[in-house]
Amino acid sequence: MNPNIPSIDQLKELGLPAPVSYAPQTWGWWVLLGILLLAALLVGLRRYWQWRRDAYRREGLARLAQLRERSDDLNALRELPELLKRVALSMPTPIPVGASLLAKRPAHSRTVVTDTTLSRSGSLPQGIAVLGRDDWQAFLQRHSKKPLPADLSTQLAQLAYAPDDTLRALPAPQRQALFDTCQYWVEHHHVAA
């Protein structure tokens, strides 16, 4: 054997390079990551805000489902117009500029008498509660995404005030159509943001 040939015992393991970091190496990537995290946070907060804002809608739909289960019961039919009115009253409304100042006004300030009722806070006019017939129909239509039956407010008034015999005479398809229309409106009515 040739004595100049190295033996296997003389071999040494090569040193490995430093592991590659997964962290971005330049500041631009950190900025982009920060923007993406901020955007995700804002989207999450907006979704949470919408979910909280639509709590009245979920409660209305749950009550409507209970009423639909007992659609043959006259009390369930009579509660349908009241439910729509409660949902309409619970709709979030944009607060006008200065509304918080109206709520904080001193008790001795001049008050103006209006023909509209006041909201629960006592400061903002709440006109939905006093709507009837044509105005109620116009309100429902204005906040609906598709056309509603032209006589919906009349049908709702009939449900609320007609004698029991008249309600018993309503055919089942007409009852279901009323429940479907009310459910569509509660699910899809437009709320100004």
Image (cartoon, rainbow, N blue to C red):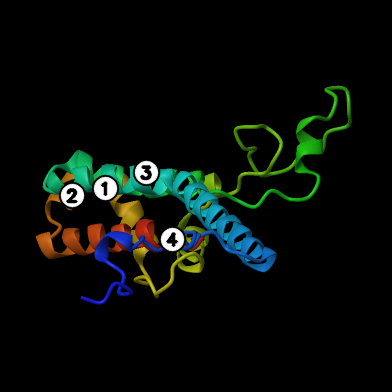
Q: Dot 2, crowdedness within 10 Å: few (<14), some or many (≥20)?
A: some
Q: In the figure, residue 62 lies in which quadrant?
A: top left
Q: Residue at x 85, y 25 (%)?
A: 106
User: In 3D space, how far apart are the residues under numbered discs 1 and 3 (Cα atoms)?
Assistant: 11 Å
Mark 2 = which residue?
68
Image location of residue 89, percent across then percent down: 50, 45
CB-based contact (under 8 Å), mark 1 and mark 4: no
Foreground label between 1 and 4:
4
Could you tell me which quadrant the N terminus lies in?
bottom left
Nearest to the observer: residue 12 or residue 135:
12
Amino acid at the residue labelled 1: Leu
The answer to whether the residues at label 4 and label 3 have Cβ atoms under 8 Å apart is no
- Badge 2 element: helix
- Cα distance in 3D space between marks 4 and 2: 75 Å
Q: Is residue 103 left or right of residue 30?
A: right
Q: Residue at x 62, y 58 (%)?
A: 34
Residue placed most toward the observer, 120 or 72: 120
**Residue to which mark 4 is pinned:** 15
Q: Earlier in the sequence, mark 1 or mark 3?
A: 1
Q: Which amino acid is tagged 3? A: Glu
The residue labelled by disc 3 is 82
Sequence-wise first label, 4 or 3: 4
Which dot, 4 or 2, sits closer to the camera? Answer: 4
Q: Is residue 118 left or right of residue 167?
A: right
Determine which residue is flagged by label 1. 64
Q: Position of residue 174 (x, y in %)?
A: 18, 63
Which residue corresponds to the image point at 69% horizontal and 44% vertical from the top-left?
115
Compute the Cα span from label 3 to label 2: 14 Å
User: Which quadrant of the figure contains the C terminus?
Assistant: bottom right
